[in-house]
Each structure stands twice: as structure tokens, then as C-alpha cells.
Amino acid sequence: MLTEWFFVGAGLVLLFAGGEALVRGAVGLSRRFGVSELVIGLTIVGFGTSMPELLVSLDAALGGESDIALGNVIGSNTANVLLIVGHSTLVAPIAAWDKAVRREAMVMAGAALVMLAVGFTGVVSAMTGLVMLALLAAFLFAAFRSSGGQGSAGDHQPESRSVALLLLITLCGLAALFGGARLLVDGATAIATALGVSQAVIGLTIVAVGTSLPELATSLVAAIRGNSAVSLGNIVGSNIFNIFGILGITALVTPVPVSGMMQRFDIPVMVAASLLLLVILRFATRIPRLGGLAMLAGYGAYTAMLFAR
């Protein structure tokens, strides 16, 4: 089983490096062509940090491992709130007053409730995926409009690298993402079989946490620098992209079945975590370290229950 763990480790490294290269290359290209920082933040960076989840879910769904495909999305959203926000809070108490983040948190909670309703139908169909993508487009449009015209094309930093180099960086990032996704899914599937645990559990834990590494790195760095809006906004935005974007695209390619256990336990846990963060953002001025410890304890208990079932 050592080989399978090597595949998982190598896959995670490639996903992390590929996501970083993709974002850097795409942002550089956007700056070269005069695209505003606002559009870059809402689209390229948002999608870029979620590319590991997208490639893993697509690869798993096309390979018939639907529990890994869906578990990756559900598990990533749960880990983003309980694990990543919890860890970031331990680094420094996070201020929770940013109005834009609060608005986006309402969309995040709405997306989680949509997933709960869709889950009870037993499958995420192509039509449902199309609706999810339409909701994502509406969210991006509303976010852009609510900016009040901030972030014009002239606000960005100049880009000195050539277009050819930026294209090469972007393409290398995509290649690393594709390769990493394949290694991670193959390794995780083999480990699940060898350990006698379900693919859903592996998808909800190892795969989900692994594909959330870009969000973890971004939020921790933002927390260290005292930028609470970025730390929280990164998580909230990623959770919206995961459900409406990643699951929407995956369902368009192939329908994604939802198991009974996902319906009854894992999706409700994700919804509860999303609502918890929304309540904190709406009624608290900051998330103290004690709150972060409680989140981490909750995630630990959830993970223990997954492996015990």
C-alpha cells in the first residue's frame, strides 16, 4: 500500500503546485491584457484555487467513483469552515465585520441548502448542474455590480513577464492539475479498497482536505497578515464555487448519484457548518481562538464518526 500513499502524496503536491501556477499565469495574462483586479479576483483566482476540486471530481465521476466526486465537494466545504477557519483563528482572532463577506456568507449558506434539497432527489442531474452554473453566474454578476465600480483596469500592478512565458506557466499549471487529480483519485481508491473503508469516507477526508490546500495556504497567510476579509472571503467564495461551479460542471458531464448516507449525514453536517459560519459573521465582531478550537474539535469528531461507520 506504500505505492498508493505515494500516489496520494504526489497527487497532492501536483495539485497544489498546479493550482499556484495556474493562478499566477492567468492573473499575469489578465494584467497584460488590462483586465481589472476585481474581475481577476472574482473569476480567475476564485476558479483557480478551486481547480483541484474540479479536476478531482470530474476525474472521479468519469471513472465511476461518484462517492469520491461528491464527497470531495461536500468534504471540502466542511473542512473549509471547521478545519481551515479553525486553524486560521488559532493563528490570530479573525474580525467578522466585513459587509461584503457577510453578504457572500448568505449566498454560501443558500448554496448549502440548495445542495441539501438536491441531495434528497438522489442524483445531481445535468439539468440541476445547468441551474447551479446559472446561479453561479448570477452571483458573480451581483458581486461585480455591488463593487460600485471599484477595481478598474488601471488599478492593477504592471506585468513585466512576456505573454509566451505566462502562457507556459498557465499550461504547466493545468498539466500538473490533470496529473495530480489522476494520481490522487487512483491512490485514494486503492487505499479505500485496501483498508476496507468506503470511497465516500476517503473522498470526504483525504481527498477533500488535500484539494483544500490552496484555500488553507491562502487563509493562513491572510490571517498572519491580519487581513480577515481575505481569510474569510477566500473560504466563503470557495464554498460557493465548489457547489455551484464544480458540482454544476461535473453534473453536466455526467450525472452524480447521491448516496443515502450523504443525504442523511454528510450534507446536513456541511449545511450546519455553513449556517454556523453565517451566524458568527452576522452577529459577532470577531471569531476568538476558543471558537477556532471548538471548530477544530467539531471537525475531529466528524472525521472520527466517518471512519467509525
Image (cartoon, helix red, strand yellow):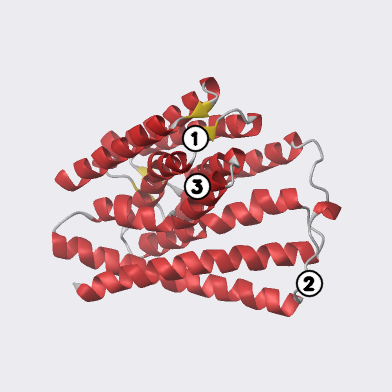
Q: Which of the two discs, 1 and 2, sits closer to the camera?
A: 1
- Residue 256 point in image, percent of width and height: 38, 51
Label 1 or label 2, whichever comes before in sequence order: 1
Q: Is residue 167 visible?
A: yes
Q: Is residue 166 left or right of residue 187?
A: right
Which quadrant: the N terminus? bottom left
Q: Which of the two discs, 3 and 1, sits closer to the camera?
A: 1
For label 1, the crowd category at 10 Å Cα-Cα, with few meaning under 14, some 14 to 19 and many 20 or more, is many
Q: Which of the two discs, 3 and 2, sits closer to the camera?
A: 2
- Residue 190 point in image, percent of width and height: 23, 67
Cα separation between marks 3 and 1: 37 Å
Helix, strand or loop at mark 1: loop
Give the number of the disc on residue 93. 1
Q: Is residue 120 visible?
A: no
Q: Amino acid at mark 3?
A: Gly
Q: Amino acid at mark 1?
A: Pro
Helix, strand or loop at mark 3: helix
For label 3, the crowd category at 10 Å Cα-Cα, with few meaning under 14, some 14 to 19 and many 20 or more, is many
For residue 174, above or below residue 87: below
Give the number of the disc on residue 129. 3
Label 3 or label 2, whichever comes before in sequence order: 3
Q: Is residue 64 left or right of residue 92?
A: left
Do the residues under discs 3 and 1 have CB atoms within 8 angstroms? no
Label 3 or label 1, whichever comes before in sequence order: 1
Cα separation between marks 3 and 2: 39 Å
Give the number of the disc on residue 160. 2
Identify the residue at horizontal 82%, vertical 60% (top origin).
34
- Residue 287 point in image, percent of width and height: 48, 30
Task: Name the residue nearer the viewer: 129 or 307.
Answer: 307
